[in-house]
Image (cartoon, rainbow, N blue to C red):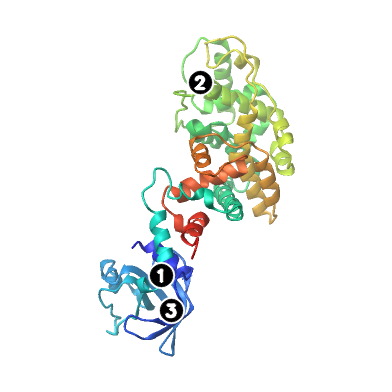
Amino acid sequence: MKEDFLHYVWQYKKFALTNLKTFSGQELTIIHSGYYVQQAGPDFFNAQIIIDNQKWAGNIEIHSKSSDWYVHHHQTDANYDNVILHVVWEHDTDVFRKNNTVIPVFELKQHVSHEVLQHYKNLFAQKTWINCENQLATIDSFTISNWIERLFFERLEKKANEVETLLQKNTFDWEATFFQLLAKSFGLNTNGEAFLKMAESIPYSVVKKEGFEVKSLEALFFGATGLLEDENEDNYFDDLKKRWNYLKYKYRLNVNYYDSVQFFKLRPDNFPTIRLAQLAQIIAKQHHLFQNLINTNSIHQIYHYFDCNVTEYWQSHYVFDKPHSRRNKKITKSFIDLLVLNCILPIKFAFAHINGNSIEENIVALASEIVSEKNTIIDKFKSVGLASTNSYQSQAMLQLKKEYCNINKCLHCAIGQKLINFTS
């Protein structure tokens, strides 16, 4: 029997609580099962129990078999000196304290109901995709809606923590942090880290000073990502390179090209050249973008802030020196949606958190106005009974798949817990 199931059974008291006895026959009463902290040392801290009218306060250790105590070398670890009860599925050997007295044992398998055990086995039986794929559609809407909200904010909080880490590196300069996070988001998964390194290598004070001239911003962004290092006969390229060399000297920029930007397997509209050109236009057009985004809760206003096109040159190019027929390369609504999810919502949430404000309802409302992401994970969830109509739901589902389904954390999932206790 896996220990995570035993932790779940003990934490949530999924066993008969009357007429309990230790393995040696002593009467056992559980006053407090302890706090499940999931760190080094015993599994549950500060528990309170009564054994034959003697009250004990201390820690609880849980194992599949009693002998696991010695397998894990707890007998040599001082963290386990205060264990008052050894909870096991099967008792196969006595465990002694340092004073040679036996630690009381409570054997769980005698007390867990057949229904709970059978539901656990059914849940973890081999499936084609996720453990609950054959039962997910049976879960009530109340459980689903509450769990979706929890998952959404788990995912958002993780992103907000990354914002706060970046903020500390920038000595709490919110605008610089936003610029760096926005640049990373423009790079998407393929070039996100390279774009972030670019944004970190240029002091934001320089971006603000040069922010009134799109071509200067392009020179900074293309130069700091290494896209101006080659030789090229293109006049536009030559102009940007001269600007870059001048700006690099003027501001004493020390740029190291940590990561080369990638074009391979990208659609032309996602080429780093196009995304950097769009980023330059946004910075040049919206001089108070961070404050405007913090103050708005309208998705339509956000779409307006990012409504811009690239310069004339990039309307007829995807890369330097290879012209093509003129094409509109405005930032699309679907791309802005990605910026909202990966940059704007996390930084709004982090800003509110640090300033002691609560904006959860506004965050949910914004995410709910964005259409659901379309990918294989969302499609598979729909096929097993969990459909998504907006990004509030689809973001939660991505969190569910990555942080719970993929690593079999069903016992920490509201859906898994519901299935195990469906009729118990």
Residue 39 lies left or right of residue 344; in this view the side is left
Q: Earlier in the sequence, mark 3 or mark 2?
A: 3
405 over 4 or under it: above or below: above
- Amino acid bearing label 2: Leu
Q: Which mark is residue 58?
A: 3
Q: Residue at x 54, y 25 (%)?
A: 270
Q: Residue furthest bottom?
A: 53
In this view, the mark in front (1 or 2): 1
Position of residue 222 measured from the top left corner of the image (x, y, whole percent): 54, 24
Q: CA distance from mark 1 to mark 3?
A: 24 Å
Label 3: few (<14), some or many (≥20) within 10 Å?
Answer: some
- Residue beneath disc 2: 228
Does the rendering let one see residue 176? no
Q: Residue at x 47, y 21 (%)?
A: 229
**Mark whose residue sits in front, 1 or 3:** 1
Circle 1: element type: loop
Q: Position of residue 159 (x, y in %)?
A: 56, 46
* Element type where label 2 sits in the image: loop
Q: Quadrant of residue 112?
A: bottom left
- Left or right of residue 205, residue 263 in this image: left
Q: Nearer the viewer, mark 3 or mark 2?
A: 3
Give the amino acid type for the residue marked by disc 1 in the picture: Val
**Residue 112 badge:** 1
